[in-house]
Image (spheres, helix red, strand yellow):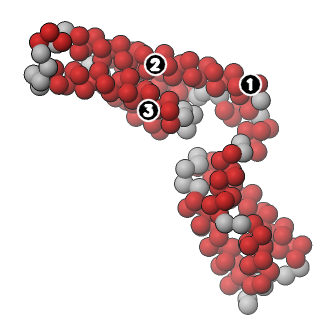
Amino acid sequence: MKPVQAEAFVDDYLRRLDAAAWMLSPDRRTELATEIRDHIEAALRSAGSRDEVAVRNVLERLGRPEEIVAAAMETPPAAARAKPTATLRAGGLEVATIILFAVGWILYGIGTLVAMGLVWVSHRWTRRDKIVATALVGAPVILLVTQLLALLPFVLAPFAPILAVLGSIAAAIHLGVRASRLSQEDAAR
């Protein structure tokens, strides 16, 4: 088999790896693909051949791409192990999210809506953090909307806007505490 055809097996394997790694951050996905490609190249050099049999053996020894991604999710990336405080601390996106949750209600809720988008875009927050922030803001907003649609008794009407503001502030406090704890954990690594 020609080296070009053997290279097609490697390219296919790397495409499957990239598809399996969809939940990793783009930087981590790129780093993982580079690590695996370098490993394949080193293994083929040591095998002394780039024919179909050698390529298939190397890829078989590596294992399924899904297994590699699962292992990569359990192991922090090499860059994070080398410099945890430089790569894992809360950045501008996270700080902006916390600030918008805290004061976004002043802008008639637009800042809070932007903060909701930012919390879900950030790779720093865990899924649990995102769900808690959404619930803290979402439940009072649902209450406010139902009150505006006259679906709630008038007795609860004055509390709906107050609960919406408190939910947004509670989300800011929750994310601020989580950011502080995550930064402390990263510094300890």
Residue 7 seen in render: yes
Q: Earlier in the sequence, mark 3 or mark 2?
A: 3
How far apart marks 1 and 2 lie (CA) works out to 22 Å
- Could you tell me the amino acid type at mark 2? Ala
- Could you tell me the amino acid type at mark 1? Ala
Secondary structure at numbered mark 3: helix
The residue where tag 3 is placed is: 131
162 left or right of 71? left
The percent position of residue 115, horizontal first and vertical second, equals 41, 27
Write the residue at 22% across / 21% down. Answer: 144
Q: Earlier in the sequence, mark 3 or mark 1?
A: 3
176 left or right of 77? left
The percent position of residue 50, horizontal first and vertical second, equals 80, 81
121 left or right of 29? left
- Could you tell me the amino acid type at mark 3? Ile
Do the residues under discs 3 and 1 have CB atoms within 8 angstroms? no
How far apart marks 3 and 2 lie (CA) works out to 13 Å
Q: Earlier in the sequence, mark 1 or mark 2?
A: 2
Q: Residue furthest bottom?
A: 1
Relative depth, front residue between 25 and 61:
61
Q: Which mark is residue 64?
A: none
Write the residue at 61% across / 19% down. Answer: 180
Write the residue at 54% across / 34% down. Answer: 126
The residue where tag 2 is placed is: 172
The residue where tag 1 is placed is: 187
**178 shown above or below 20:** above
Write the residue at 59% across / 67% down. Answer: 15
The percent position of residue 93, horizontal first and vertical second, equals 52, 30
The percent position of residue 145, horizontal first and vertical second, equals 19, 25
Other residues around mark 1 within 10 Å, as few (<14) / some (14–19) / many (≥20): some
